[in-house]
Every structure is written in C-alpha cells, then in structure tokens.
Image (spheres, rainbow, N blue to C red):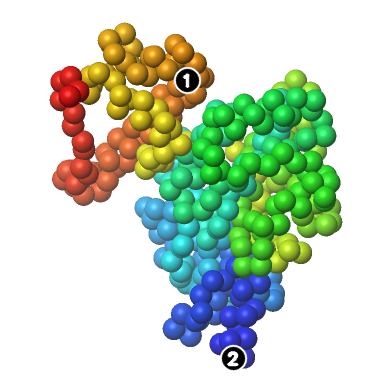
Amino acid sequence: MSEATLIDRLRHIGWRGDSLPSGGLRLARVVAQHRAGYELHDGEHLFGAQPAGHFLKRGLDPAERPAVGDFVEFEPGSPPHIQKVLPRRTVLSRAAAGERYERQVIATNIDYVLVLTGLDGDFNPSRIERYLSLIEDSGARPVVLLSKLDLTDDAADRVAELRGRLPGEVPMHAINGKDPASIAVLAEYLRPGDSAVLVGSSGAGKSTLTNTLLGVDRMATSAVRAHDSRGRHTTTHRALLQLPTGGCLIDTPGMRELKLTGDENLDLFADIDELAELCRFADCGHGSEPGCAVQEALDNGGLSAERWRNYLKLRDEREDQAATLEARLRRQRGGRPIDRPHGHRGQRERD
C-alpha cells in the first residue's frame, strides 16, 4: 500500500501530517485504554494492543505512557505491541488524585475541549472556570456547552450569568443534547480531521450528546438524582469515536476531582490581575489596604465576590501544586535547585 493511501486512511482518525515516520513500524491511534491493554485504530480496522516493556518500567512518568488520542507506532504480532508514542501536538491533563504528585493525561492531539454542564442543578460557573483553567495550556480551544435546555425555564439568565464571568472569545452554546437540530451548531468543531474531547461531571448529559452526534444509541445513559442532578458514571473509560461529520470525539467519564497541575497561567482571570496593577501598593494584599482597586471593584459590583473567591482558591491551589512539583523535581535532581525564575515586588508604593 502506498504512503499516500496510508495517509489518506489515517486522516479519517485525525492524522495531520503530510508524511509518515520512518522506521518501518505501522501507525495507529489510541482510541481506548483498559486495564488489560489498549484499543488502536489504523483508519480502517480496530484492534487490541499491548504496551512494549519500556512503558511498564517502574518509576516512569505516567504521562509518558500511551494515552487516548495518541498516534503510536506499533509492531504487528499476537498481540501487537506499541513501541513508540509520536510527539503530541496538544495535551489535556490534570493532577491525579492523591497526595503524590502525578500528572494524568486526559486526551491528546485534540483541537477542541467541549466542556458540558447542565442548566439544571449541575450548573456551576466556578467549576467551569476550573475546567477552562486546565484547558489554557493544553493547546486546544475550549467550547462551553450548556445542556438540558429543554428542562429549564431560566436558561437565558444562567447563560447571561456565565457570559459575564467568561472571556468573550470562549464560544458558548445552550443545547438540548437529545435534539439533532439543537446540536447542529457543534458541526464546526467536528469537521473532518478535527478531534474534540467531551468533559463534564456525571449526569451532565455527555453520553446523551454523544449518542445524538453518532446518530445511534451507542453509549449507555442513566437517570440523574433529583436533588443535585448528578448521575452515575455511565461512561467508564475514555474512548475515541468516529462521527458521521468526519471528526473524532473522545468521550470521558465524569470527573469529580479536577486538580490543577501547577503550570496554569490563570489567564481566565486577567481582569483581576489588571485590577491588582491599579492598587496603590505593589504588594497589596487586597484586604484592608488603602487604595486597593480590587476591594473597590468588589464594593461597587465590578467584580463579583464569588469569582474573586474562586480565583483565590485556584491561585492558591496552583501555587501548592507548583511547589509540590518543584520538590519532586528537586528530589529527582539529587537536591539541586530548579532553575525557575521568580518575580519579586518590593514593599513600596506604586509611582
């Protein structure tokens, strides 16, 4: 089979390159990961595979192992074995649960992150801000989807509330995940060659939306609890699906914990940083100091107290995670310091 034919086949599963890697191994994309191994797709066939031994070495950073969305080189056999993970153009990750610092890769080589939240009891602007903070450095673009439009009477108010908290460049769509006409607006994010990952809490309607995009009831769905609109984990593992539109969608289980990695810039809160620059003192703690622009904005309604509290929470968590990561890197370097520039502002009044 010619290289051009192989490339054309791989484009069906999101391949962007104009040539194939040299080395003689075959190429496929990781579409699912299970405890027993991986599922790969080469653009024509779906098949199981195992990781090569070097991916199983003790102490290997989990982020270096194959993840859903990766393009990998594999060696045919019974079973085939993944030998190499090709460079990732985008990576969405979070810090894994637990006290030990590890980075968990959610999806790779994606163009869009579709953040789904219900307009019912699942609606939580602070959680959406947390998702967007994680997405900032992934290389992918966020798209906020507000589901269950058919089940709420105050959708317009909630959309307006969220629009007031998020940057204007973040696309936002209120949808009914069961209605193909309602989700037609998503076609621009799922064109041939595009890859998107769908994230959100359990019960937000990810499986329902996925089924509508597929045009078949392929993903299991379940009812949500009445008192908090939460559901069970009907999706149990990340899986990449080929859509009729030509794009690829990675569906994920509901994530109850979204820990920052420590590398986030929190650009989502650039307006708060701009306010802080207007404070009289460069080291203003934004409490009772005179001339505090942040406190003035809180008093006059220019900055909501809820958004300010969420910013502080995310900022402190990021700093804690960054310190934990630095300590880990220091141990790996035998106690030698890490070259990380730190800004310093003296205790002085601004000019």
In this figure, which residue is indicated by the disc labeled 2?
A: 2
Mark nearer the viewer, 2 or 1:
1
Q: Disc 2 and disc 1: Cα gap in Å? A: 61 Å
21 and 98: which is toward the camera: 21
Q: Amino acid at mark 1?
A: Gly
Residue, far bottom: 2
In this figure, which residue is indicated by the disc labeled 1?
A: 302
In this rendering, position of residue 351 left or right of residue 93: left
Q: How many marks?
A: 2
Which percent across, then down, holds residue 109? 52, 61
Q: Is residue 299 above or below residue 187?
A: above
* 10 Å crowding of disc 2: few (<14), some (14-19), many (20+): few
Pointer 2 or 1: first along the chain: 2
The quarter of the picture where residue 344 lies is top left
In this rendering, position of residue 15 left or right of residue 96: right
| Residue at the image position 68 percent from the left and 42 percent from the top | 173
351 and 73: which is toward the camera: 351
In this rendering, position of residue 20 left or right of residue 267: right
